[in-house]
Image (cartoon, rainbow, N blue to C red):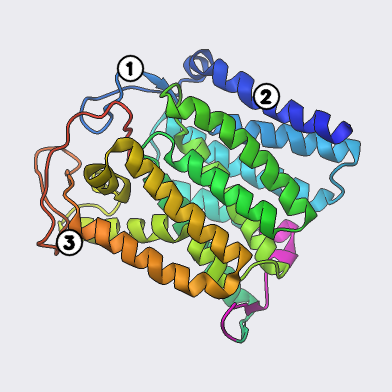
Amino acid sequence: MLFVFVDALAIAVSWLICINATPIAERLHVMDFPDHQRKSHREPTPLVGGMGILLPLLVWLCAAVLTGLFRDQQFASMLMLCGAGVGLAGFADDQTCTTPLSRILALLVFLGVAVALMPALIAHSLNWGSFEPTPLHPALYGALIALTAAGIVNAVNMADGQNGLVPGLFVVWSLCLVLAGDENIAMVAQIIAAAAVVVLCFNLRGKLFLGDCGSYGVTFVLGLLALAAYARGRITIETVTVWFYIPVVDCLRLMITRWMQGRSPFAPDTDHFHHRLQAKLGDHSGLAAYIACVALSSLVAVVAPRFALVSLIILTAIYFSFAFLTDSAASAEDGDTETSAAGFSNVVALVPPEQPQLRERR
């Protein structure tokens, strides 16, 4: 009964934040205003979706520790401190745009804090599902997870350009961790999934956006849970790769093509994978296709890890089919040029009609 009460409390906090999104955002100065170019939503929209997931999680962790429902206090303290820290770094960017480098540095600092609080996060080998484990020095493993964490968080942040997309991915990844993790990981992931569902319902209707507080903070917490699950032997490298494959590959493609076009790798445009799916399948079908690809492949990788490599091959075929063969827009940051993805002559650049549900800030 106590467990149900604590869960209900967290969900209630998420719901209260969402229904009061506008006054909260106005008070905290985190409203996203349309510019009729990349930000094509019709009216100022609150950037409090991340708070609607992180704050309920923090409330749940505090209540669960105080009531004895969550006994691993070291794990809970690490999640609360590091999740809140990276979430605040993203919140600062929601208020006044900060540089990508400053956000990455903040992420790496809190990753170091996480490892300092829980040295068990550092594994001593690369555990494959299809091959023998590869021994690895702890220092090299630390460098590898730093690179991976920065890459995944920034990839998800760049994918946050369509209503329902990233919150939907949060639900998928959280449920995968519920299935794959141990008791403590599963409990935390379950709360993230429940809060993400609440935020998803409001985000799909355009009532609020996730904000960098969410795309950075929540992704970082999910990454820590995945890191803990991996260190405890619950998942393999192939499984984690399948989970985050499409956002990361899309991020790498965009950074390379932007560089080839002479632009900053971090310059925003409308050439993301979800834009290309929308151009081919339509808004709602494109969103459903993106989430379905991630959900189905992730579920297979969790339930039957031996098929993770097959899932990666299928995802690669799907991604590159739509990423390179679908008409889409590839707008430069200043909006004065229309270019196709550099190096791919089979991509025709089009200017899509204004989409009220799109929010492109990357």
- Distance from Cα at disc 3 to Cα at disc 2: 45 Å
Residue 43's tag is 1
Give the left or right position of residue 223, taking residue 242 as reference.
right
Give the left or right position of residue 2, taking residue 221 as reference.
right
Stretch of the chain drawn in magenta: 114-131
**Position of residue 252 measured from the top left corner of the image (x, y, whole percent):** 33, 61
User: Which residue is label 2 attached to?
Assistant: 13
- Distance from Cα at disc 1 to Cα at disc 2: 25 Å
**Position of residue 283 measured from the top left corner of the image (x, y, whole percent):** 30, 37
Amino acid residing under circle 1:
Glu
Which quadrant of the figure has residue 358?
Answer: top left
Residue 167 vertical position relative to residue 342 in the rendered view, above or below: above
Residue 83 vertical position relative to residue 183 in the rendered view, above or below: above
User: Which residue is label 3 attached to?
Assistant: 260
Per the image, is 250 magenta? no
Residue 99's tag is none
Q: Nearer the viewer, residue 164 or 76?
A: 164
Q: Is residue 279 visible?
A: yes
Residue 190 vertical position relative to residue 53 in the rendered view, above or below: below
Q: Earlier in the sequence, mark 1 or mark 3?
A: 1
Q: Earlier in the sequence, mark 3 or mark 2?
A: 2
Mark 2 Cα-neighbour bin, 10 Å: few <14, some 14–19, many ≥20: some
Task: Please count the marks in the image.
Answer: 3
- At numbered mark 3, what does the secondary structure look like: helix, strand or loop? helix
Quarter of the picture holding the C terminus: top left
Which one is closest to the eye, mark 1 or mark 3?
A: 1
Q: Nearer the viewer, residue 218 or 120?
A: 218
- Distance from Cα at disc 1 to Cα at disc 3: 34 Å
Per the image, is 115 magenta? yes
- For the point 10% across and 44% down, the residue is 338
